[in-house]
Image: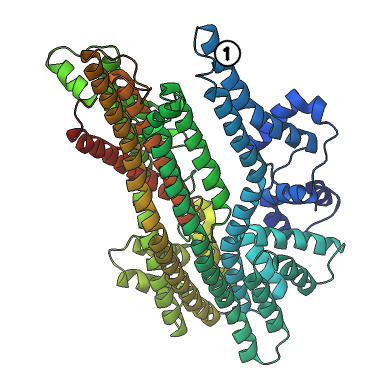
Amino acid sequence: MAEKDLISPLERFPIPSDVREALQRVLGPRKRGFYEKFCCVAGGIFGFFTKNSRLSQKTLRELKEAGIKVEPKDWAAGLVLSMVIPIISSLLIWLLIIFTGGDIIGSLYLPMAGFLIGGIFMMAFQNYPASVAAQRRADAQGKAIRTVMLLSFSLYHRPDIRGATVQAADMSEGKLAEDLQRGLLELDERRRYETVRHLLTVVANEWGEIDDSVRQAIFDILRSTGAKDESARLADVAKAPERVLEGAEEQLTKRLNSLVMPTLAFLTFSSLAIISVVGLSPIFGVIGFNFVDLKFFTAVALGLVIAFLAFTQFMMGHRPATIQISTLPEDDPRLPPPGRLMVFGKKVPSLIVPFIVFVAIAWPGVLYLFGETGGPLGYIVFSFSTFWFVWAAAGAIGVYAYLYVSKRARIRDEERRKLTDWGNALNTIGSRMLDGKPMPQAMAEAANLMAGSPLAYELKEVSAKMERYGLNLHEALFERGYGGRYNPIIRSFLEMISRIRRDSEAAAGRACMMAAEFLRTLHRVERRFREKIDEAMGNLWLVASLLIPVVCSMSVWVMDFMSGMKFSMAAQAATAGVTGIPFLLGAMGIMEIALLRLVMGITAVALSFIIARYIANIRAAGDRVELWSSVAKSVIVSATIFTLTSFLLTLITVGGG
């Protein structure tokens, strides 16, 4: 349903407050992404030529599922612009080389590389909506687990299908929650659905194309509403979350297998390409081609980076759904605001510190490029040549990642421990309530038993508010913004428990213990998912972190070795009075080798960054702590391996640069 069809009913019809509150996230304003802005700019440039464009049903469906809103003419213009940008850029550079006296034929590879990169850009642009749509489906599957759990939890304690649907839609996120929110709106308007059962039946069948286990779980819930025996009803309700968890785990294994082997094959062939194109380029001199040119190697490195980005973006569309029960929002009040880092207690712009680190490490490399190699300092500078820039790039990324992750990782670990403590606390509170204790007293006793835990203070605070001021559980937990400090899933359970407690203290006690069991199940499944992903991705990370920098370093070494051999042969031939050797036509001098080392070193760091981003998105999509932790480790390891390999290979090279 179009967004305009959803907004107008809110203005024209009286909507129940529970449904209206649940719909706020769905109907809120949405910012345009880079892809949409790029298409808009392209439409302004090529819109006249693409105004009659028509998109296929497949493309339209992918754009809709990806949440990308563009006009057909703008999308077609974006496709053209994505191809034209690298082609025009390479042609301009080629013409500049020609006008400055360069070799026309010898630099012909530049426009050829431009056309190749343009083709990669065009394919990446065309595949992007499908990849994003697939990633959104994976996110939807992961978040649907929580929605089904909340739906099941609510129905387990109260057979109110409408109330359970409203609560699950209001207290969870993702596509399933949004589908329920839209359906509730249409139900209240009497436009499409007759009852909540009808709504759930339609949603279940729509979800069959995304995840069959979610569909079957919804049917389990629907079957429970028709059961006459209470034990049969509870069995059907309890079966729903088990079904979605089993389906997610089965899909995890299949998708991991479909990710690992293609990625390993791509890394292997990319490594062979680096060695063949860069390291063995002097061999092409035998057949009359001279590709020993720093500009050519730079174009190859740029093409590799773009190819890695396109490949990983495509493969991320096949990633499995994951379970994340402890993530930190960027607007958490305990963290510095977006775009800032905390350094010595001061909030500074996030790019300042890595820039300073890069300049501090890279300045000896600048001296080397300007030829300042005299004296003791010059000897040190000359010994490491352009390695300084590689270390500077890795160091800047590593420092930024450390400053970004350090506090967030500590808070996340605290939240995970608190989440575990909540499971124990809910079991204790529920048990004492079933013994006849009122909830404030049960919470105080649980806090005493958990002395030393950060959660104990919060439990005592809530218990004191309830006893001292006569507040109910909801008021004590969530008034004055205190609810924002709770993990979303904990908040959802506590909200439901507070509603159940209005009817019965004993029922609330049972709900506490059931919530603890749900948390334990989520912890167990999340840990099992992470172990499987780590087992599959660990080998991939190891191969990428070792293979890429070693291959990049070896390509420089081969070029250095063959150039040294060419110069040695030329010197011996000159001594013998022979001129012109038709073998190994290309060779690079010391400075060119140093610049090639810089290009390949930065390439190794960039490729390691891309692979780390890819692996982090498979492990925990959207978790920036996981992302920067993986990136920091990868770029530092890559720079270290590149440096060590280069030094070791130089030891066996005569006349190495």
Q: Which residue is drawn at 55% across and 17% down?
A: 94
Which amino acid type is marked by label 1?
Leu
Q: Tell me residue 462's x, y (percent).
A: 44, 63
Depth order, front residue of 209/57: 57
Depth order, front residue of 316/160: 316
Horizontally, residue 175 falls left or right of residue 523, namely right
In this rendering, the answer to whether 274 lies above or below 583 is below
> For the residue labelled by badge 1, is the local secondary structure a helix, a strand or a loop?
helix
Q: Residue at x 66, y 27 (%)?
A: 84
Query: Residue lying furthest front in this view?
Result: 577
Depth order, front residue of 518/55: 55
Q: Which residue is drawn at 40% across and 44% down?
A: 628
In this view of the protein, can residue 353 be seen by the observer?
no
Q: Residue at x 65, y 86 (%)?
A: 233
| Badge 1: residue crowd in 10 Å (few <14, some 14–19, many ≥20) | some
Disc 1: which residue: 95
Q: Tell me residue 574's x, y (percent).
A: 24, 14
Query: Residue lying furthest bottom in this view?
Result: 229
